Image (spheres, grey):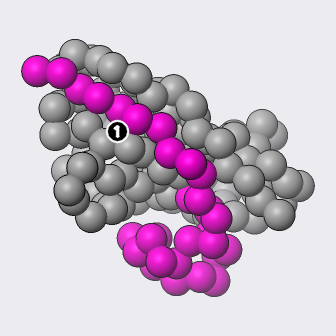
């Protein structure tokens, strides 16, 4: 069983930065593709960023491109989301998720097999 635990959320002023971490249990972390999603109150969950199993390819939502960076450390079974130039509209619960390479598009949450419990990010104006 794969378990994901996010950390690093919090309250930050607009223009500030946060780094989210997602620690993944299990010996097969390097075989999973990883994604970050977020859900704001009253809104649907949306894709934020994803990274392939080796870390060589990354994908971003247009709303975060140039501000957020996803990375992974397969030796530490951890995926990160560095968030810079944060905006109030980035306020949401952020979730990390893992999917097998053959499970379809990075952009759709339904293709992910495992999810963390989420971490709150609040950006004040």
At 51% from the left and 26% from the top, the residue drawn is: 8
- Residue 70 position within the rendered picture, expressed as x and y whole percent measured from the top left: 47, 44
Residue 59 versus residue 91 in the image, above or below: below
Q: Nearer the viewer, residue 7 or 85?
A: 7
Q: SS for tag 1?
A: strand
Residue 24 versus residue 44 in the image, above or below: above
At 42% from the left and 45% from the top, the residue drawn is: 94
The part of the image, by quadrant, that contains residue 99 is bottom right
- Residue 61 position within the rendered picture, expressed as x and y whole percent measured from the top left: 28, 57
Q: Nearer the viewer, residue 6 or 75?
A: 6
Residue 88 versus residue 44 in the image, above or below: above
At 67% from the left and 49% from the top, the residue drawn is: 4
Q: Is residue 24 in view from this perspective?
A: yes
Q: Is residue 51 in view from this perspective?
A: no
Write the start and end of the magenta stretch as one range. 97-125
Q: Nearer the viewer, residue 65 or 77?
A: 77
Q: Residue furthest front?
A: 42
The residue pinned by badge 1 equals 68
Q: Residue furthest left?
A: 125
């Amino acid at each position: 069983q794969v378990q994901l635990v996010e950390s690093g959320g919090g309250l930050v002023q607009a223009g500030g930065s946060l780094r989210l971490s997602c620690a993944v249990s299990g010996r097969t972390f390097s075989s999973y593709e990883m994604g970050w999603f977020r859900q704001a109150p009253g809104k649907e969950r949306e894709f934020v960023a994803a990274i392939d199993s080796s870390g060589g390819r990354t994908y971003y939502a247009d709303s975060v491109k140039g501000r957020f960076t996803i990375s992974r450390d397969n030796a530490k079974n951890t995926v990160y989301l560095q968030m810079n130039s944060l905006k109030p509209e980035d306020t949401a619960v952020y979730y990390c998720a893992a999917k097998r390479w053959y499970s379809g598009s990075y952009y759709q949450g339904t293709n992910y097999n495992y999810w963390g419990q989420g971490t709150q990010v609040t950006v004040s104006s």
